[in-house]
Amino acid sequence: MSSLYDRHRAVIPDWVALYYRQPIELTHGEGRHVWDADGNRYLDFFGGILTTMTAHALPEVTKAVAEQAGRIIHSSTLYLNRPMVELAERIAALSGIPDARVFFTTSGTEANDTALLLATAYTGSNQILAMRNSYHGRSFSTVGVTGNRGWSPTSLSPLQTLYVHGGVRSRGPYAGLTDERFIEACVADLEDVLGQTRAGVAALIAEPIQGVGGFTSPPDGLYAAFRQVLDRHGILWIADEVQTGWGRTGEHFWGWQAHGQAGPPDILTFAKGIGNGMSIGGVVARAEIMNSLDANSISTFGGSPVTMAAGLANLTYLLDHDLQGNARRVGGLLIERLRSATAGVDAVREVRGRGLMIGIELTEPGTDRANPDAASAVLEATRANGLLIGKGGGHNTSALRIAPPLSLTVAEAEEGAAILEQALRNL
């Protein structure tokens, strides 16, 4: 019988990426650890792309899923759904958006797709502002607003997208400025871009911290400054919280709160961590925006009783155990440990991030050029020593992505940092 890898290649598209020269099959997990089909145990510093947010095989979540599956698995949004209403109530209250309505989807891509539909329908415009180096999903519309060539396979789009500066602090034409001057320059760029538009713009969509782009972010307050311009022009702000939500950044429950001086976003999208591995995405928006669609709509799988039960159990665990506080404390220790460990490593350009969302940018020694070979080498070396991490980056950049479950302990953070240090120093 052929190997699982050979079978994968025979039936799965070539563009579905796999990590590692010899891809691994993960069979089970517990806490912050997973095991592969050969019995190897790994400390998980990526959580299935920031999705296993609390812990693997969390008893509270698996119990909720099993109990709900024993009652009813599926009904669709055509019927009243108690777990969906209960989770929507909690998310609406946590969102910070007044008079909020919540619509559930099955992924972050679908959530962002819905947000774009709402914004364009509400404003009557198909023009969208997006950030350079951004990523918002793999559907036709979200690819059209993704500012990262490596994840945008076509230039065709139903939207007219205009890209503005600000998502990357340490690269680009404004990198040498102070934070205050950086924000001023980005606001001036935004105003200039708006001066080129023919008519009204529907929305700005932005990740508070760019995920696939390598965990880059602007100075605090940039999007608040943008918001003043947007409000003047009647442009909505969509905060893509698919990777930054639920306390991962430690300092805030939502990434937008680092830019909250001008108030909450008009639309907020979420996914990944809320289901702790179950397929949950969603959109939160003011009622006047959410209710602006004048056609019927449903979701066959969004708001599934089973996934909603998982989300409720997971959110309860997250809040009851103050995992945001743990992300702040343990993440703060981890980022400082990594900065210390990489001091003097020529291949490391920058260690950045917040909470348990940390990026290590790699370059060719002595240059500012991306070093994807080094990133691949570190991935292989850390896996060989029992640690799983991710990678990413935008235009001419290469970064390691570190995003463990938010229940990570200090001892596990130190263990992972030591493995990373060895891999980086052996480059």
Image (tube, rainbow, N blue to C red):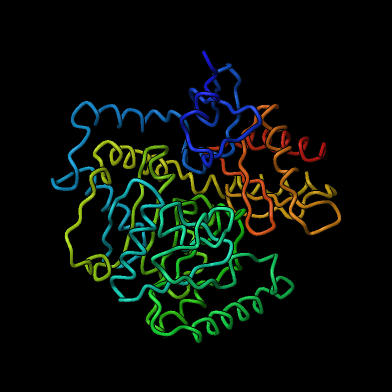
Residue at the image position 27 percent from the left and 36 percent from the top: 306
Q: How many marks?
A: 0
User: Picture coordinates of residue 146 (x, y %)?
Assistant: 50, 60
Among the 4 quarters of the image, the one containing residue 315: top left
Name the residue rendered at 36%, 59% in the picture: 95
Q: Quadrant of the C terminus?
A: top right
- Looking at the picture, tell me which residue is in the foreground, 208 or 10: 10
Residue displayed at 60% across by 22% down: 41
Q: Is residue 377 above or below residue 57?
A: below
Q: Residue furthest top?
A: 1
Q: Nearer the viewer, residue 129 or 152?
A: 152
Lateral position of residue 68 relative to residue 132, left or right: left
| Residue 357 picture location, percent across and down | 58, 49
Image coordinates of residue 170 in percent, x first then y, are 70, 65
Relative horizontal placement of residue 133, taking residue 320 as reference (left or right): right
Say above or below: 15 vs 168. Answer: above
Q: Is residue 339 left or right of residue 268?
A: right
For this orientation, the residue located farthest to the left is: 79
Q: Position of residue 290 (x, y in %)?
A: 26, 65
Judging depth in this view, the residue of 141 and 59 nearest the camera is: 141
Q: Residue at x 36, y 31 (%)?
A: 60
